[in-house]
Amino acid sequence: MAEAEPVRKHVEQALEALSGVLLGKEKQIRLALTCLLAQGHLLIEDVPGMGKTTLAHALARVLGVADTRIQFTSDMLPADIIGVSVFDANDSRFRFHPGPVFTQLLLADEINRATPKTQSALLEAMEEGQVSVDGERFTLPTPFFVIATQNPSSQFGTFPLPESQLDRFLMRITLGYPAPEVERQLLAGGGTHLQARQLAQCLTPEQLLQAQAACRQVHASSSLIGYVQRLLQHTRDAVGFSYGVSPRGGLALLRCARTWAWLAGRDHVVPEDVQAVLDAVVGHRIRSADDLAGHEGDRLVAQLLAEVDVIGQ
Amino acid sequence: MKGQQISRTAVVWQLLAVALVVLPHLQWLPLWVPVLVVASLGARLMIHRGRWSFPHWSVKTALVVASSGGLILSFNHQAGPETMVALLVVALALKLLEIYHRRDALIVLFVTLFVAATAFLFNESVWMAGYILLVVILTLAALNSIQQASDANRYRDNLKTALHMLLPAIPFMLVLFFLFPRLEPFWSVTIDTATAKTGLSDELSPGDISELSQSSELAFRATFSGEVPPPDQRYWRALVLSHFDGRRWSRPEPAVRHSLRAEKLTPLSPEQPYDVIMEASGRPWLVALDQPVAVEPGLRMSAVRTLHLDAPLERRRQYQASAVTRYRLQPLLTSAERQHYLQLPASGNPQSRALAQRLLAANNGDPQAVIRQLLAQFNREFIYTLAPGRLGSDSVDRFLFDSQQGYCEHFTSATAFVLRSADIPARVVTGYQGGEWNPYERYLQVRQYDAHAWVEVWLDGEGWQRLDPTSAVAPERIRTSAGEFFNANNERFSRGGLELEWLRDMRQRYDAFNYAWQRWVLNYQGQQSDLLKDWLGGSEQWRLILAWLLPTAAVFGGVAWWQLRPRRVRIKDPLERALLRLQQRLTGENCRRQPAESLSMWLQRIAGYWPEQQSQMLRLAWLDDQQRYAAGADQTMRTEMLQLCRQLLRELPGRRIP
């Protein structure tokens, strides 16, 4: 852990910088960073204009990674994301023109506006880390993050992501309206977009990789793993849950908890770490038995926390 | 549940249980009922194999009508237990034809259990108990198998489950056996078995007892708490016959019987208490050892000191009495009584009357000398045999002067006649004499062939004395048991088969086993009332009800508690136990640990409430966090935590925040 300590200093600087851009959203910023350090993709769900894009741009800046933004629309095709092979008359052969997906941090704005076909093209790239065009395989750069934003699917003109694709996102967070105090500050200070562009890079790509490796080293004791397992089991057994969390969801939870613990400066995971990331990691993976729209994740998470004892007997 | 299919295994179990439960009833059921059962079983098997389809409703209706008619015709409108059991069996057979669902199978099996219980109405032996236990196990296996999925085909598993289900039933069975009050049935259950009961009749004519001597059926068994009387003292009185009509000795008319005074008995030897288990005889009288002095309440003693019940004995019954072997009975007779015991028909048997006068004259009217001479004559000239031939009219004359051979009733009848003719009061007593001693269970076993008749003669100043003319002609019949005597004189008594020693031993052991069963299981009633008296200090109704209700409530309450008790897992780790106790101690409104709180979070939250213990609590919080979640926890941490826990438990006084 000793060699990772300076890296953690840099990460804390990044957190501080981000907090300056997105006022009053420390928890969400920390969660977003946790998600990226845990090498997962992030889904930000909120109504337009809450600062989703700002957060994505700011993250790209402080992490020093190349970022591309795609605005999804309902007439978008998979080739608009992946790229397209074009016939080159000079060389007498097809040449692949990489699409916007060939980047390190992809901001997929309003992913639920696109058709399922286009969505799935992106999600496949997220899962595999590569794209196939005309039988040829192209590897995506590393690190590769996707920060997707979506409007709540109850709004008009959206194609809600099915459960299988929601599962590909490590976390789903919502930003929410700012606190009145923060909002007044925001209104007085003018637009924030400019500030995000002006942020300094806080981490080198090597440092980012080091941080990711350090997170994986955080110790999770058998007591803690027992608690995580009981949480998962409860989502499968208890009344009120339509379906439970998959083992992949469980692994995701533990990975995020480790990262959260590392961000907090601990070398071991404690239950509070699990509880801190639980809503973001598990909220979009469970569904209430009497809710079909999938918007009661946070209520179920509260139920989960109240019903599962930290100390197993 | 209704729509569930039942498995093939379940069908086989059901058929087996039904077939076996009907088996014990075969001996008395009208023939068409077993035929119906077999036909239904066969039809059920064919339906089960898919060869036949379920019968049409019209067929079923016809069967119901025909069976009802058959029951009415077979049982002659009698609503006895046989009719009811036959109705159950018929219903069982018909229900077999319409098992569609699990519910139908349940009905069949419940009725099967009921029919199994009815078997005890007809036979209470230990063998039947064992057999019914087997049937119950099979029925339980069937019940188990119909609750299983239709593809489960494990006969052995069903059987195992059935046995496991019986095991916890044993304590309940014992509680029921010992404490359930043996109430008299609300209705009278009279079962006429096919074989008429053999036993003493209420009169004595020549040939009655020799007929009984062919029967080895058990009459009664007796146990003695003290000394066992020698064989020649084992006279069991049943009836006193004092009226002679020229051929038959019988009891006097009820009006005459009631005019007799209760006879006064002065014991000359200590009382001998004993216990009798009398087999059902269909007659109201019981046997009592000569002479009874004290009997248990519920039994009646007549004026002539014989025992009887108010109603015929339809079930085996156990009773206690005591006897004296030496006594003085009724030393004074009124003239009416004297006349009663001298009664003879006006005419008939002239030779015997003349013999009486001759004896009287030869002995100067001394009754004892008359008796001695008569018996000496028997001893010299008469033959004791079971096949005396027919005697015709004036039977006493024919016996005394022509055939001169006979069985105990001939000697008794003739003796009583001659004595009465000689003006000596005499009467005939019937009952049993002797019996076989069973050394294994130490009881006396008396069979019908031990039936006997003897004379009681009244002597001035001495009262009634027993006089057995058979002992004069065949003393060994009195000294040994009837069984042995007949065996030793096998040819003369023309009783088939020689009994081997080892066979007799086996038979005695077998009988001893049956006796123990009857005494300890079937006739538990007597001991139960003693037991209840000892335990409860009385046997009133309310005591019985309480004695029944309280243990039952205790047992069922115990079972309910065991099932519903809060399941607290026993924690082995002393540290975890101490931490849990700490949590249980601090359960105030804001103190209680929330499920989502780890111990260290909780301790940090509440540490502020107790400033004096704050540092210990924070230390404990840190230690718990380390040992529970960090890598490399060690024993010293646990030891320190345990100490901290105990210290906090000591110092933190109550549940409330101060």
Image (spheres, rainbow, N blue to C red):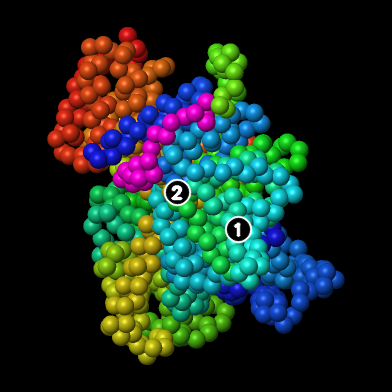
- Element under disc 2: loop
Quarter of image, res A292: top right
Seen at 76% across and 41% down, the residue is A157
Residue occupied by mark 1 = A97
Q: Is residue B392 magenta?
A: no
Q: Position of residue A86 (x, y in %)?
A: 65, 63
Residue in front for this viewpoint, A308 or B326: A308
Question: Reading the chain from its start, which is encountered first: label 1 or label 2?
Answer: 1
Whether residues under marks 1 and 2 lie with C-beta atoms below 8 angstroms apart, the answer is: no
Q: How many marks?
A: 2
Q: Residue furthest left?
A: B636
Quadrant occupied by the C terminus of chain B: top left
Residue with the most extreme right position: B58
Specify the quadrant of the image occupied by residue A273: top left
Residue at the disc numbered 2:
A143
* Residue B115 appears in the picture as rendered: no
Would residue B214 be visible to someone looking at this image? yes
- Going by the numbered disc 2, the residue's amino acid type is Pro
Q: Position of residue B53 (x, y in %)?
A: 76, 77
The residue lying at 59 percent from left, 50 percent from top is A100
The label nearer to you, 1 versus 2, is: 1
- Kind of residue at disc 1: His
Q: Which residues are magenta?
A: A195-217
Q: Whole-percent x and y of residue B417? A: 46, 68
Question: Is residue B441 toward the left or the right of residue B311 in the image?
Answer: left
- Label 1 marks which chain's residue? A
Name the residue at 60% across, 58% down.
A97
- Position of residue A52 relative to residue B340, above or below, is above
Disc 2 is attached to a residue of which chain? A
User: Which residue is rendered at x = 46% and y = 85% of the image?
Assistant: B387
The answer to whether A250 appears left or right of B570 in the picture is right
